């Protein structure tokens, strides 16, 4: 966790609603890393916006551009927020 001392310093409490959030394939989501979660995401993807392309267990597979390269990230729902292009 190099360089994450101040980035992950604040502890947000995970609410039940954050754990139970449901997304569908094709939804646009924002990545907001929750430091109190036991499944951290690499800090480079903090604040990125991506599209959900699949589901793996309770986690979601998200496609995000890292520069010009398209990468896939696996993240739980407590790290995700609804984006503009989400289906209603």
Image (cartoon, rainbow, N blue to C red):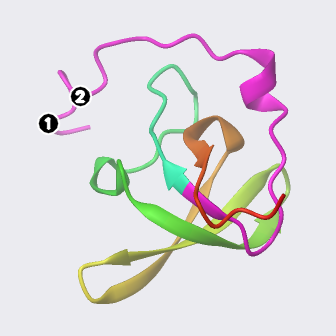
Q: In this view, does 33 lie to the left or right of 44?
A: right
Q: In this view, does 24 lie to the left or right of 43?
A: right
Splitting the image into 4 quarters, where does residue 63 fall?
A: bottom right
Q: Position of residue 82 (x, y in %)?
A: 64, 49
| Closer-to-camera residue (32/82) | 82
* Image quarter in which the N terminus is found: top left
**Which mark identifies residue 3?**
1
Nearer the camera: disc 2 or disc 1: 2
| Closer-to-camera residue (56/13) | 13
Q: Where is residue 78 in the image (x, y as percent from the top left)?
A: 64, 35
Residue, x 72% and y 28% (percent of image)?
18
SS category of the residue bearing label 2: loop
Q: Distance between the residues labelled 2 and 1?
A: 8 Å
Q: In this view, does 77 lie to the left or right of 20?
A: left
State how many labels appear: 2
- The magenta stretch spans residue 67: no
The reply to whether the C-beta atoms of the residues labelled 2 and 1 are less than 8 Å apart is yes
Residue at the farthest left position: 3
| Closer-to-camera residue (46/87) | 87
Q: Position of residue 38 (x, y in %)?
A: 58, 29
**Which mark identifies residue 29?**
none
| Figure check: 70 above or below 16 | below
Residue, x 51% and y 19% (percent of image)?
36
Give the residues drawn in magenta, as a range.
1-29
Q: Main secondary structure of the magenta part?
A: loop
| Figure check: 80 above or below 17 | below
- Write down the residue under mark 2: 7
């Amino acid at each position: 966790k190099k360089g994450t001392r101040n980035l992950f310093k604040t502890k947000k409490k995970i609410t039940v609603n954050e754990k139970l959030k449901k997304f569908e394939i094709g939804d646009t989501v924002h990545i907001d890393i929750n430091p109190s979660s036991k499944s951290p995401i690499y800090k480079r993807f903090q604040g990125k916006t991506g599209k959900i392309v699949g589901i793996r267990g309770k986690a979601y597979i998200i496609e995000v551009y890292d520069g010009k390269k398209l990468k896939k990230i696996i993240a739980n729902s407590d790290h995700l927020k609804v984006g503009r292009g989400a289906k209603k």
